[in-house]
């Protein structure tokens, strides 16, 4: 995919905007997950150049309880949906 100077300039403006917005947020907690279970569902793919890579599409699902936050990492497998659970805060 080729990008021209105009699209690179627009992309750099977006990056600066995101960095500016992120500066207004603070870290409430960190999510740590063991992805060994999800690794079973990875399928090797190749770039146009022939380089091998793996891709996992996932969602971070956050539950807001009265006294805690809880998060799960969810992904779709070839057969069903997978989920890893972890209390984060």
Image: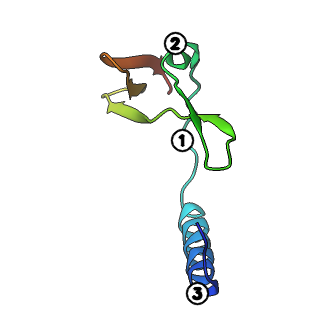
Would you name the residue on which mark 2 appears? 37
> Residue visible at 56% across and 34% down?
45
Mark 1–mark 3 Cα distance, whole angstroms, equals 37 Å
Name the image colouring. Answer: rainbow
Q: Which of these two is toward me, 52 or 89?
A: 52
Mark 3: few/some/many CA within 10 Å (<14, 14-19, 20+): few
Where residue 15 sits: x, y (%)?
60, 69
Mark 2: few/some/many CA within 10 Å (<14, 14-19, 20+): few
Task: Compare marks 2 and 1 and give the one earlier in the sequence.
Answer: 1
Q: Which of these two is toward me, 22 or 69?
A: 22
Q: Is residue 68 visible?
A: no
| Left or right: 82 as drawn, with respect to 39 | left
Label drawn at residue 71: none
Q: Which of these two is toward me, 8 or 85?
A: 8
Would you name the residue on which mark 3 appears? 6
Where residue 19 sits: x, y (%)?
61, 66
**Mark in the foreground, 2 or 1:** 2
Where residue 89 sits: x, y (%)?
50, 27
Task: Compare marks 3 and 2 and give the one earlier in the sequence.
Answer: 3
Task: Compare marks 1 and 3 and give the one earlier in the sequence.
Answer: 3
Label 3 element class: helix
Quarter of the rendering occupied by the N terminus: bottom right
Where residue 39 sits: x, y (%)?
55, 18
Label drawn at residue 28: 1
Q: Is residue 31 visible?
A: yes
């Amino acid at each position: 995919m080729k990008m021209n100077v105009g699209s690179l300039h627009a992309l750099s403006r977006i990056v600066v905007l995101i960095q500016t917005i992120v500066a207004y947020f603070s870290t409430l907690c960190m999510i740590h997950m063991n992805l060994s279970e999800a690794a079973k569902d990875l399928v090797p793919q190749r770039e146009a150049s022939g380089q091998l890579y793996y891709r996992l599409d996932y969602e971070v699902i956050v539950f807001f309880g009265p006294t805690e936050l809880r998060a799960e990492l969810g992904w779709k497998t070839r057969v069903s949906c997978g989920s890893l659970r972890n209390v984060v805060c």
